[in-house]
Image: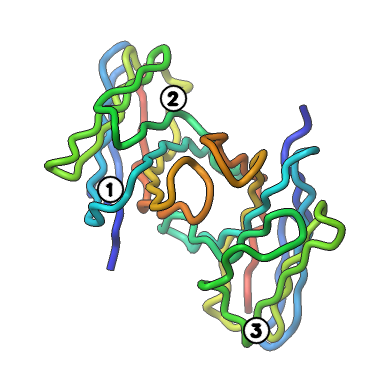
Amino acid sequence: DQQVKQNSPSLSVQEGRISILNCDYTNSMFDYFLWYKKYPAEGPTFLISISSIKDKNEDGRFTVFLNKSAKHLSLHIVPSQPGDSAVYFCAANLYGGSQGNLIFGKGTKLSVKP
Amino acid sequence: EAGVAQSPRYKIIEKRQSVAFWCNPISGHATLYWYQQILGQGPKLLIQFQNNGVVDDSQLPKDRFSAERLKGVDSTLKIQPAKLEDSAVYLCASSLDAGGNQPQHFGDGTRLSIL
């Protein structure tokens, strides 16, 4: 039973446009959410996070939105760049912060075309 | 700052053989994690250490998997005996401490193939 779902295995976007990656979760007790980016043959790299007490967190070109009532979060990348092409994982945590057992989605492969 | 170091990068063994992976976390990071990532899935936590003590090993298949973190720094993960379903990338991660919001930093992983 997947608690964190990324229903789009892949996404293709033109350079300069917005990329929107979606994530749904089932456990209403999750109180911290993170996005990781992964290039082939490398480990995941932390990108951005959001606490459940917030609905938006922004860091440069990356913004994460959280809709608790819908149990949905999204990552917006504006503008998208070819170097953003990677697999993006959504992760959630029960215990607060980024520590402990992160529950990951299956990932969405983003391709940004020049 | 040096990242999380893992070795080997790749390992191929036959089923029922044994294998060990090594992880050196970022200097000063008290918390260390081992994750298993099967192809097409997200990483799944196997075990979490705080210094040299185990915090969470609820998802570790203890009949065949073992892990230790002697002296609270380096860690090894062992599989004995290996099964076909153990084919995966084994990721080590570390973070500064068990509280707060410092992110987990991942190594590049060890890709294990079981024949």
- Which residue in the protein does label 1 denote? A6
- Which residue in the protein does label 2 denote? A84
Q: Are marks 1 and 2 in one subunit?
A: yes
Against B87, residue A9 (above or below) is: above
Q: How many marks?
A: 3
- Quarter of image, res A62: top left
- Which residue in the protein does label 3 denote? B64
Quadrant where the C terminus of chain B sits is bottom right
Against B80, residue A81 (above or below) is: above
| In the foreground, B93 or B73 | B73
- Quarter of image, res A68: top left
What kind of residue is marked 3?
Answer: Arg
Where is residue A49 drawn, in percent x and y? 41, 32
Q: Are marks 3 and 1 in one subunit?
A: no
What kind of residue is marked 1?
Answer: Gln
Asked which secondary structure carries label 3, the reply is loop
The reply, left or right, for residue B32 in relation to residue A107 is: right
Kindly identify the residue that appears in the image at 26 percent across and 14 percent down. A17
Using the image, name the chain to which the residue with label 2 belongs: A
What kind of residue is marked 2?
Answer: Asp
Asked which secondary structure carries label 1, the reply is loop
Q: Mark 3 and 2 residues: CB-CB less than 8 Å, in contact?
A: no
| In the foreground, B6 or A59 | A59
Kindly identify the residue that appears in the image at 54 percent across and 37 percent down. B100
Q: Are marks 3 and 2 in one subunit?
A: no
Kindly identify the residue that appears in the image at 64 percent across and 48 percent down. B93
Q: Mark 1 and 2 residues: CB-CB less than 8 Å, in contact?
A: no
Asked which secondary structure carries label 2, the reply is helix
Q: Residues under labels 1 and 2: Cα distance?
A: 18 Å
Q: Residues under labels 3 and 1: Cα distance?
A: 31 Å
